[in-house]
């Protein structure tokens, strides 16, 4: 269910940010393992779980949107496309996650190289992994928040 008030919307955003921090910490923990490539696999799995969970919290999963009446569904799809989101309200696939990871590709490449430097490299790799995961998760939250905020504002305008 899409939040109906800004107070409810802000609560959902806070819950999602907490979820992102937990998943970013898990990503950092996976990055400490000195096996090149293992952390990227973990990041993909984490993002495949995290992004749909954020969509669901905001009421913007594909299943939730499909259950809405045609008029609201159309408004949501227009808003999603107007903000340029590629994952809000969409089925999250490995390809979508790979595309997102490419956006932070330089960080991922540095992370892989630093793994070969004992101790310090693993710490740097963990920091990069945490930062990249947090950035991607929070960016998705911001997009979902903007979609819901515009829906709330449109409903407020219609009822005025």
Image (cartoon, rainbow, N blue to C red):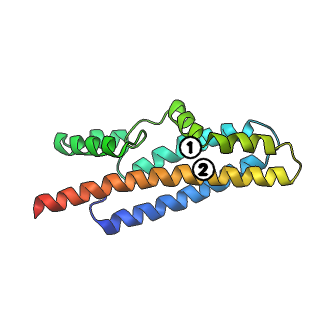
Q: SS for tag 1? A: helix
Q: Is residue 1 visible?
A: no
Q: Which picture quadrant has residue 127?
A: bottom right
Q: Are the residues tagged 2 and 1 within 8 Å (C-beta)?
A: yes
Q: Residue furthest right?
A: 118
Residue indicated by mark 1: 47
Q: CA distance from mark 2 to mark 1?
A: 8 Å
Q: Residue at x 41, y 61 (%)?
A: 12
Residue 3 location (% of width, % of height): 31, 59
Quadrant containing the C terminus is: bottom left
In terms of depth relative to the viewer, which is nearer, 143 or 23?
143
Q: Residue furthest bottom?
A: 7
Q: Residue furthest left?
A: 160
150 horizontally vs 16: left or right: left
**In this rendering, the label closer to the viewer, 2 or 1:** 2
Residue 157 location (% of width, % of height): 15, 60
Q: How many marks?
A: 2
Q: Residues within 10 Å of mark 2 (few under 14, many from 20)?
A: many
78 horizontally vs 53: left or right: left
Mark closest to the chain's N terminus, 2 or 1: 1
Q: Residue at x 33, y 69 (%)?
A: 7
Q: Residues within 10 Å of mark 1 (few under 14, many from 20)?
A: many
Numbered badge on residue 18: none
Q: Residue at x 42, y 35 (%)?
A: 91
27 horizontally vs 85: left or right: right
Q: SS for tag 2? A: helix
Residue indicated by mark 2: 133
């Amino acid at each position: 269910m899409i939040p109906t008030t800004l107070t409810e919307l802000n609560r959902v955003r806070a819950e999602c940010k907490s979820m992102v921090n937990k998943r970013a910490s898990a990503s950092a923990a996976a990055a400490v393992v000195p096996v090149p490539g293992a952390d990227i696999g973990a990041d993909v799995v984490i993002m495949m779980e995290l992004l749909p969970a954020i969509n669901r919290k905001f009421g913007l999963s594909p299943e939730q949107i499909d259950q809405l009446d045609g008029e609201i569904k159309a408004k949501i799809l227009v808003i999603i496309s107007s903000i340029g989101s590629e994952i809000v309200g969409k089925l999250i696939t490995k390809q979508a996650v790979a595309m997102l990871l490419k956006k932070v590709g330089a960080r991922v490449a540095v992370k892989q190289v630093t793994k070969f430097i004992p101790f310090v490299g693993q710490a740097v790799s963990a920091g990069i992994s945490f930062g990249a995961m947090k950035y991607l998760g929070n960016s998705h939250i911001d997009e979902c928040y903007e979609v819901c905020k515009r829906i709330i504002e449109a409903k407020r305008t219609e009822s005025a």
